[in-house]
Amino acid sequence: MSDENPPGLDLARLRAHLDRERPGLVSGPLSATVVEGGRSNLTYIVTDGTGRWVVRRPPLGHVLPTAHDMKREHRVMSALGPTNVPVPPTVLLCEDESVLGARFYVMAFVEGTPYRGADELAALGPERTRAIADRLIDTLVDLHAVEPGSVGLGDFGRPEGFLERQLRRWKKQLDASRSRELPGIEELHDRLAARIPVSPPPAIVHGDYRLDNVLVGGDDRIKAVLDWEMSTLGDPLTDLGLLVAYGERSTLDLSFVSNVSTAPGHPGTDEVIARYAERSGRDVSALNWYIGFAFFKLAVILEGIYYRFSQGKTVGSGFEAIGDGVPPLVAHGNAILKED
């Protein structure tokens, strides 16, 4: 652990705030390390030598508060605390930007592993891999079974017209990051727009549900679901469609994508869908649309990253490979929708 202030985290100011708001929580000087990875928000592990906590704040120099809504993440995790959905216990939310320069929240540290690669799962063996993958699906079913109003999240989103709005949002995102021809992407969008399915009753949607966004304990049980920044009330099948697309995406041999679904013992796409359908009781007959939409969304996200790279706004290596990964996603999305 570093005793120095990592970027974006003033330990003395954090300590003073915690002492004010949670007297007795911290018993010694704080030190911190930055957690690598994660979608976009900054995450730190903080310790006083006895206890450990996690601090989350928006990236430095962020300009879109809605994209990094600390209050939203803190609210959904606090609401889910008493349910069957494993989430880290929340400690506090700070909306006073004078403390750290941005809103932030603090939660308890949860011990666990975010499995990111097939090699990590392969080391566990096929039986344990299967058990972890099954529990990932079961936890998603548990999340979608929570009645939003019963945990104070009845106003957490606008479920009416959810799919239409989502499709419009990602099309707008695509139009804002066009720098080259992408054969088939208009066709994919138009196919999706032409047959938007009727959504089941709304549920709490995670928005980016996958194995490396959960912590798995030494007993292979899921200890905590993380990264709630995309969560809302909406169509639960968007979570399942994205989970399936992440699984199929790894078979497209994209080097920068988590390939956990290729580990021996990991259930195939049909088994993932069947388990969710059986456990949730939901009709999944229109799931191809949701998988096609997930591929469209992933293609737009990756094209946005490639666009920023092509404009010289992203520093680092490997971004050409991300650009090369977009056409296979588009082709796969179109192929799935053609199956119907």
Image (cartoon, rainbow, N blue to C red):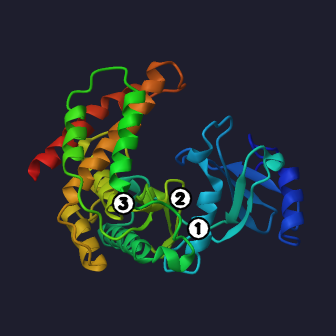
- Residue at 62% x, 50% y: name it: 35
In the image, taking residue 128 as reference, residue 231 lies left or right, namely right
> Mark 2 — residue?
228
The local crowd at label 1, few if under 14, some if 14 to 19, many if 20 or more residues have their Cα within 10 Å, is many
In the image, taking residue 11 as reference, residue 172 lies left or right, namely left
Disc number for residue 77: 1
> Mark 3 — residue?
239
| Cβ atoms at labels 2 and 1 below 8 Å apart | yes
Give the answer, above or below, for where 161 lies relative to 136: above
Position in image of residue 332 (x %, y %): 20, 42
Q: CA distance from mark 1 to mark 3?
A: 17 Å
Q: CA distance from mark 3 to mark 2?
A: 12 Å
- Residue at 33% x, 45% y: name it: 167
Query: Three-letter amino acid code at disc 1?
Result: Met
Query: Three-letter amino acid code at disc 2?
Result: Trp
Q: CA distance from mark 2 to mark 1?
A: 8 Å
Q: Nearer the viewer, residue 248 or 193?
A: 193
Considering the numbered disc 2 on the image, is that residue within a helix, a strand or a loop? loop
Query: Three-letter amino acid code at disc 3?
Result: Asp
